[in-house]
Amino acid sequence: MKHRGLTRRDWMAFAARVALASSLPGMTTSALALPPRTLVFPRDHGSHPELQTEWWYITGHVRSKGKPFGFQVTFFRSRVASTQGMQSAFAAKQLIFAHAAVTDIEGRVQHHDQRIARAGFGIAEASETDCDVRLRDWNLKREGPVDQYRFATRIRSTRFEMDLTLQGTQPLLLQGRAGLSRKGPDADQASYYYSAPQLAVRGILTLNGVHHVIDDVVDDVVQPQVNRAWMDHEWSEALMHPEAVGWDWIGMNLFDGSALTAFRLRRADGSTLWAGGSMRAPGGATQPRVFAQDEVTFTPTRHWSSPHSQARYPVQWRIDTPVGSFQVLALLDDQELDSSGSTGTVYWEGLSDLKSPSGETLGRGYLEMTGYVAGIKLS
């Protein structure tokens, strides 16, 4: 369907950008502070449509016949405030969209795709009782008993496919203060946020019609770095402070079984507006060490300029935390994602190694950097 030269896809993409305005660089909306609350599972694995923005975010690294791959799957839900009072079943009250990518380290290439649809009509849904999000033939679902967690995801794209199961090996990690994570100096800049680190991955990645069966790791003590994933689930009414233009974030599964999170929100001049994170010891039996906003420092040590967007990204960092200093090194410089067909943003998200100051590799995970390309303009 066309209207004044725009396709229906154009209009849907525009609606998504409007709906996400509060969580994108330079765009804010007034919101009340989120109250502390006890997260309850499996219900809080599910959707929270009363709040504006939510995402289920999975990243991981695997091997197939010894070859390394990275993968990323993110489902977003966005509440469209302007349509909530409409009675029509066709009103786009909730939008569901998704990004997916596979990084072939040896091939030096990243494959990615994106989708968007309004919730309903059997096309896109996000359950409120448990993790069960789908967008056409893309899906993410929790499986198994209510006191355990195992996630399964299936992605179908013309360039790649994923059929993966991600088994929990540790308790869920509640970020911030018992799952309420501050993201800025004002109380309303916060989210409910938990992570599932050290997920054991099995399944198949398919690239250009070639199936890559994930290696079956018999002795995880010998090869603890193989086939691990990280899941974040976060939902909020407003995340971004007016001065924030983007963020830098890492989620790292360490080879000894511990889990490191670190993030910062940046001003336009590159200075840090807010920072945080946590470190949990191996096994996850103890409470994490939660980092205060003045205890985390991100210092770029190498940059890469994108030939696609001309953005200049730091692809190597020194990150100082109260539990030590670390280096983060991208395994492939060109892991920029162009999601202009869905969320309207261009950002960098990619597989990276975590190293000690002396260069010892301690773990592997994902680095995400947003706001390095000009913000969205609604016109």
Image (tube, rainbow, N blue to C red):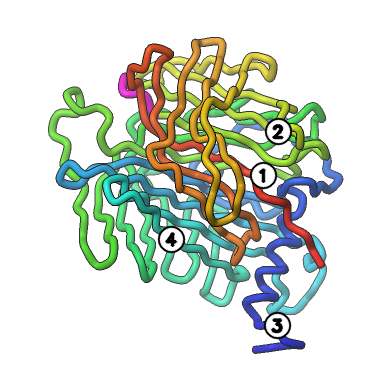
* Residue at 63 percent of width and 24 percent of height: 276
Label 4, label 2: how far apart the Cα atoms are? 32 Å
User: Is residue 254 one of those drawn in magenta?
Assistant: yes
User: Which of the two marks, 4 or 3, is nearer to us in this view?
Assistant: 3
> In the displayed structure, would residue 160 be above or below residue 149?
below
Of helix, strand and loop, which one carries label 1?
Answer: loop
Q: Is residue 75 above or below residue 305?
A: below
Q: Secondary structure at mark 2?
A: strand
Number of residues whose C-alpha sits closer than 10 Å to that of mark 1, classed few (under 14), some (14–19) or many (20 or more): many
Q: Which residue is identified by label 2? A: 266
Mark 4 is on which residue type? Asn
- Across and down, in percent, residue 197 comes to 41, 32
- Which label was assigned to residue 139? 4
Horizontally, residue 41 falls left or right of residue 267, namely left
Q: Write the residue at 43% across / 13% down.
A: 357
Instruction: Give the residue type at disc 3.
Output: Leu
Residue 237 in sight from this viewpoint? yes
| Mark 1 vs 3, N-terminal side | 3
Going from N to C along the chain, the mark reached first, 4 or 3, is 3
Which numbered disc, 4 or 2, marks the residue that appears first in the sequence? 4
For marks 2 and 1, the one nearer the N-term is 2
In the image, 56: left or right of 4?
left
Residue lying at 28% horizontally and 61% vertically, measured from the top left: 207
Q: Which residue is mark 3?
A: 6
Range of residues picked out in magenta: 253-257
Q: Position of residue 139 (x, y in %)?
A: 43, 61
Q: Tell me, yes or no, whether the two marked residues, 2 and 3, touch with CB atoms within 8 Å.
A: no
Please state which amino acid type lies under the numbered disc 2: Arg
User: Do the CB atoms of the residues marked 2 and 1 lie less than 8 Å apart?
Assistant: yes
- Nearer the N terminus, badge 2 or badge 3? 3
